[in-house]
Image (cartoon, helix red, strand yellow):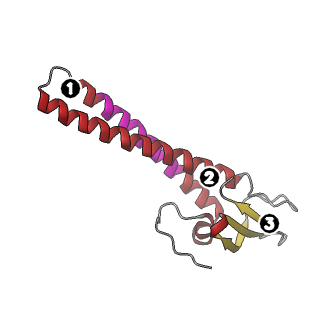
Amino acid sequence: MNLQHGNPFNPPLAVGVMRFGFRKWYERELLSSHAHLVLAFLSLVAVFASLEASRGAEFGDKLTNALYLILSAAIGVWALRRYLFLLTRAEVVANQAQCEDCGEYGRFKVVADYRGRDETEVCCRKCQHHWVINSCG
């Protein structure tokens, strides 16, 4: 099982569960997603600030403000998309984290990682039941 991943803040399910456990992985996903929401909000403030700064400015300053506006808008769109991705992934996985046999929630260990299919095979720590969690939905 290859556990290398480029983003240490939002590792895939298998890596995160083996490193932190499911509950901590889930908590970190939610915190990270909401941090992206804050960034999207701050980008919106920057867009409005650029628009306000453009009023009554000279042509060169208007071009500079237009550049800041485009940059702020791009960062905001990226942050909003990342927020939605992380939040959706966390909720999709959380809805599959309950053992089908004994009903234990979030207490499993990773058995196999099928990264090409975004699936992770897990095993319940209580009853040893195996199931597959799909992290794409």
Crowding at dot 1, Cα within 10 Å, few <14 / some 14-19 / many 20+, comes out as some
Tell me which numbered mark, 3 or 2, is placed earlier along the sequence: 2
Residue of label 1: 54
Q: Main secondary structure of the magenta part?
A: helix
Spot occupied by residue 20 in the image (x, y as percentages of width and height): 58, 67
Work out which quarter of the rendered image holds the N terminus and state it.
bottom right
- Is 120 situated above or below 78? below
What range is drawn magenta here? 31-48
* Kind of element beneath mark 3: strand
Nearer to the camera, 69 or 34: 69
* Kind of element beneath mark 1: helix
58 left or right, relative to 136: left
Q: Identify the mark at residue 89; answer none if there is no mark.
A: 2
Q: Residue furthest right?
A: 101
Give yes or no for residue 43 being in the magenta stretch.
yes
46 left or right, relative to 37: left
